[in-house]
Image (spheres, grey):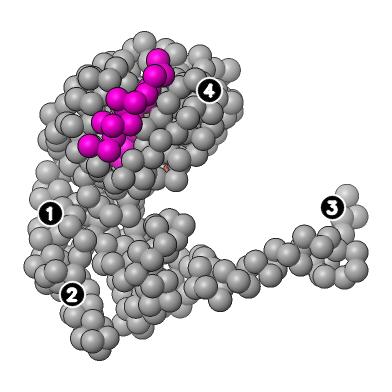
Amino acid sequence: MAAATFKTLPLSTSPNSPSTLQALREQLDRLESESLLRRRRVVNSPCLTEVNSEGASLLSFASNDYLGLAAHPVLAESAAEGAKRWGVGSGASHLVSGHTAVHEALEQALASFVGCDAALVFSTGYLANIAVMPALLGRNGEIFADRLNHASLVDGALLSRATVHRYAHNDTTALEKLLAASTARDKLIVSDGVFSMDGDVAPLGELLSLAERHDAWLLIDDAHGFGVLGPQGRGSIASAGLRSDRLIHMATLGKAAGVSGAFIAGTRTVMDWLLQKSRPYIFTTAMPPMLAHVLLHALALIEDADDRRHALMQRIAQLRRGLPGKLLPSTTAIQPLLVGDNAAALQLSAALRENGIWVPAIRPPTVPAGTARLRISLSAAHTEDQVARLVAALVQHSEAAT
Ligand SMILES: *Cc1c(COP(=O)(O)O)cnc(C)c1O
């Protein structure tokens, strides 16, 4: 076998290894000493509220599976059916030969679900977020971005090479000043709809009126609102009752939808333009058609999931009642408990783990320095008893800390 001729290179710091290897090791050690080293936990079960991880059975408040669809038997069945009908791979990018009838149907269903003319599907939300700004703006454009926007929006703005102005979180007065001072022809305002690490909702109506007044695009990332907020889970934009040709919707399909992928929706003209110019749509393999097949079923479940959304809202209210004054002001499934110090956040997360509860500690650079937190995320699949267990554990640990 030819494979036998490949030798594994030793990982070492022998005199032949590059000096940069040593530098990397030192930087990793420094991250660890500052409680900033990240590590993965291996999970040995489907994404449910009770998971098995590294030998422990844990009650999880760590996923974005807000409606409890990620391991839904109907969707697992649909995946098997999708693989039988479509195979497992698309074989090519959308513009070459990978755009199947089921991708087409999914794009149409998503567009009509959020009330837009057209939509394009992407393999991940990260790709969708680096797709729009570089296609709509060039070097002479200006982007106005909320300071707490998701990293993928930060990267999308950078890739566009436009000038980026970051405004204080949800501060529409600061945003208006920046817009008034701008001389650019091409302008775009960009914001999370629901902020991923704070759980609060952007002032969408005000953002849209500013966009209209200053002739700017408005790009809203609804990763955490889609499926959860608005009538039938149509998202934060529908919840605010907004419609506009200058509004560009983005949402992910790996959170409330329980699968994987993302989409951009808007007017036909903007989608036609993205199809020509958007590199993360053009130069990548189309998502497996079997996933598009599952996503059509997930969308139908979302539309029909008022009971799940109701259960989720009840769990949110229960958690907030149990921990008065301790959580950041959020009405969504993301309920952060601000700790501040990195090591203290890790310790609290570890203490909960000892009690069989998984709540991740979120540290910089995901959140600003000095604002490390526990990010509790709730799901419609959590029971009242499970939330009560979390409340009791947090009350016990915060009493121990004071
Ligand atoms: C998760 C997330 C993304 C990225 O989506 P993926 O599909 O996971 O790549 C983008 N924006 C926000 C606000 C997110 O929370």
- CB within 8 Å, label 3 to label 4: no
Residue 197 horizontal/vertical position (percent): 32, 55
- Residue that badge 1 annotates: 313
Residue 363 location, quadrant: bottom left
First of labels 4, 1 by sequence position: 4
Q: Secondary structure at mark 1?
A: helix
Question: As drawn, is 392 to the left or to the right of 130?
Answer: left
First of labels 3, 4 by sequence position: 3
- In the rendered view, tell whether residue 318 sits above or below residue 273: below
Label 4, residues with CA under 10 Å away: few <14, some 14-19, many ≥20? few
| CA separation in Å, label 1 and label 3 | 55 Å
**Image: magenta residue range:** 173-193
| Three-letter residue code for mark 1 | Met
Quadrant in which the C terminus is drawn: bottom left
Beta carbon of the mark 3 residue lies under 8 A of ligand 1? no
Question: As drawn, is 382 to the left or to the right of 128?
Answer: left
Label drawn at residue 3: 3
User: Is 268 covered by the magenta stretch?
Assistant: no
- Residue that badge 2 annotates: 391
| Three-letter residue code for mark 2 | Val
| CA separation in Å, label 4 and label 2 | 50 Å
- Residue that badge 4 annotates: 139
First of labels 4, 2 by sequence position: 4
| Three-letter residue code for mark 3 | Ala
